[in-house]
Amino acid sequence: MSDQISEQPPDLKFRRSYIAGPLILAVLCLITALLFVFQSPNPIAVRFDSQGAATTTMSKFVFVALIMLSQAIGIFIAAAIAQSVIRIGRNLLKTGPPPAELGGFIILMSHMVLLPQVIIAYLMLDVFIYALWERHLISALLFSLIVILASIVVFGIVFVRQFMKINSILNR
């Protein structure tokens, strides 16, 4: 038992930390929307051509509602992922202590939903900036690629470190 990374409690429970990242991002989106929605013209441009010119408009209130709905769905998905991993962890605990810390793994898995949430949050901010100042920060495609590459690096490092810990325990 001393070779284990951490002793797991006999009963894994859902914790708010499993959805903290998606929840915080949704609250930041709501605050950002409240700061910009009443200053923006109605309707606002939501689709742009390759040169950045507006091609489609939408009611700013419908737009904010759709963004917040997508953020709420992200929180729900994070909670569902956490609950699923908890169930798997409980089954692992029945066969003996797992060779990895399940709490950190649950947080990692449930926070993967941040990838699309961050991109959606940026798109909301970009739409509001365009509505107010008729300019874009950076291309949505470029921003998405930066977020995806950064997440590959971060998640890759975390997964490799976890794999190395498990591998060193199993090879003792």
Image (tube, rainbow, N blue to C red):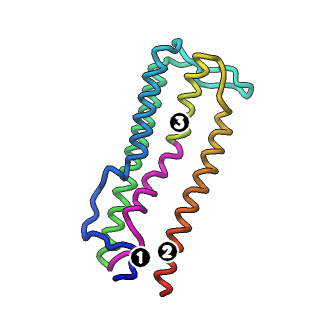
Q: Residues within 10 Å of mark 3 (few under 14, many from 20)?
A: some
Q: Give the extent of the magenta segment.
A: 96-116
Amino acid type, label 2: Lys
Q: Quadrant of residue 135?
A: top right
Question: In this rendering, is residue 95 above or below 110?
Answer: below
Q: Nearer the viewer, mark 2 or mark 3?
A: 2
- Mark 1, residue position: 99
Q: CA distance from mark 1 to mark 2?
A: 8 Å
Q: CA distance from mark 2 to mark 3?
A: 34 Å
Question: In this rendering, is residue 123 above or below 105?
Answer: above
Measured from the top left, where is residue 24 in percent x and y?
Answer: 41, 40
Q: Earlier in the sequence, mark 2 or mark 3?
A: 3
- Mark 2, residue position: 165
Q: What SS does tag 2 mark?
A: helix
- Mark 3, residue position: 120
- On whether residue 44 falls in the magenta region, the answer is no
Q: What SS does tag 1 mark?
A: loop
Amino acid type, label 1: Pro
